[in-house]
């Protein structure tokens, strides 16, 4: 496992070095603009997105019951991911007035349809999570028997003394030569 990790780390470092080398050789590189972009990404991620995600996680933990919490968290993650990818299309970035083939679809409707599918699947999963659990046991395994039963008695040993182990071609007598 350690060798695999080191291999992937070396490949990642090589890919980053190649990207940096290619970027530095590019005539279109404007270092101040690229540095500003990267700094803005870090500030937006650490200053805006992460606190919002932490606050959403705290609200979900506080307001959503335990049996469906994972379903809601998964649906929220999928919603954020899909919205992030679809937002430039929904806002029409790249659309050209005289070229109808650039962004030809109804992207807001597509986003709403996708989000409806995500939350419908989440609702079905939440119903299964709640109904599959016994009443009064919110953390128990789905489908568990709500009535406790005494353990089954141990089965009686077989009469030939083989303790239930039978091997073809081997007699039940010990030390038989």
Image (tube, rainbow, N blue to C red):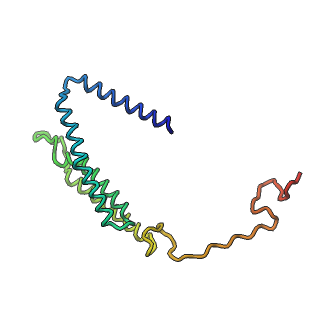
**Residue at far right of view:** 177
Residue 115 or residue 73, whichever sits in front: 73
Q: Is residue 158 left or right of residue 12?
A: right
> Most extreme residue toward the left, as rendered?
97
Question: Residue 7: image x %, image y %?
Answer: 45, 33
At x 30%, y 66%, the residue is 63
Compared across the picture, whether 18 is left or right of 107 comes to right
Q: Please name whichever residue, 56 or 164, is drawn nearer the observer in this view of the structure.
A: 56
In percent of width and height, residue 126 lies at 37, 65
Q: Quadrant of residue 136?
A: bottom left
In the displayed structure, would residue 6 be above or below residue 151? above
Figure check: 45 above or below 9: below
Residue at 48% x, 69% y: name it.
143
Q: Position of residue 110 (x, y in %)?
A: 23, 53
> Residue 124, image x and y in percent?
36, 65
107 vs 120: above or below: above
Residue 112 occupies which quadrant of the picture?
bottom left
**Residue 37 located left or right of residue 165:** left
Residue at 30% across, 57% down: 76
Q: Residue at x 20, y 40 (%)?
A: 40
Count the marks.
0
């Amino acid at each position: 496992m350690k060798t695999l990790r080191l291999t992937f780390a070396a490949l990642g470092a090589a890919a980053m070095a190649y990207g940096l080398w290619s970027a530095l050789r590019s005539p279109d590189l404007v270092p101040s603009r690229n540095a500003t972009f990267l700094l803005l990404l870090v500030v937006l991620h650490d200053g805006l997105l992460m606190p919002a995600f932490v606050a959403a996680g705290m609200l979900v933990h506080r307001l959503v019951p335990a049996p469906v919490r994972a379903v809601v968290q998964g649906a929220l993650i999928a919603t954020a991911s899909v919205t992030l990818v679809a937002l430039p299309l929904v806002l029409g970035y790249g659309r050209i007035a005289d070229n109808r083939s650039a962004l030809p679809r109804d992207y807001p409707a597509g986003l709403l349809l996708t989000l409806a599918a995500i939350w419908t699947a989440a609702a079905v999963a939440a119903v299964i999570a709640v109904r599959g659990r016994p009443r009064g046991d919110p953390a128990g395994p789905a489908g568990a028997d709500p009535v406790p039963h005494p353990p089954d008695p141990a089965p009686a040993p077989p009469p030939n003394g083989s303790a239930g182990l039978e091997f073809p071609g081997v007699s039940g007598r010990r030390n038989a030569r």
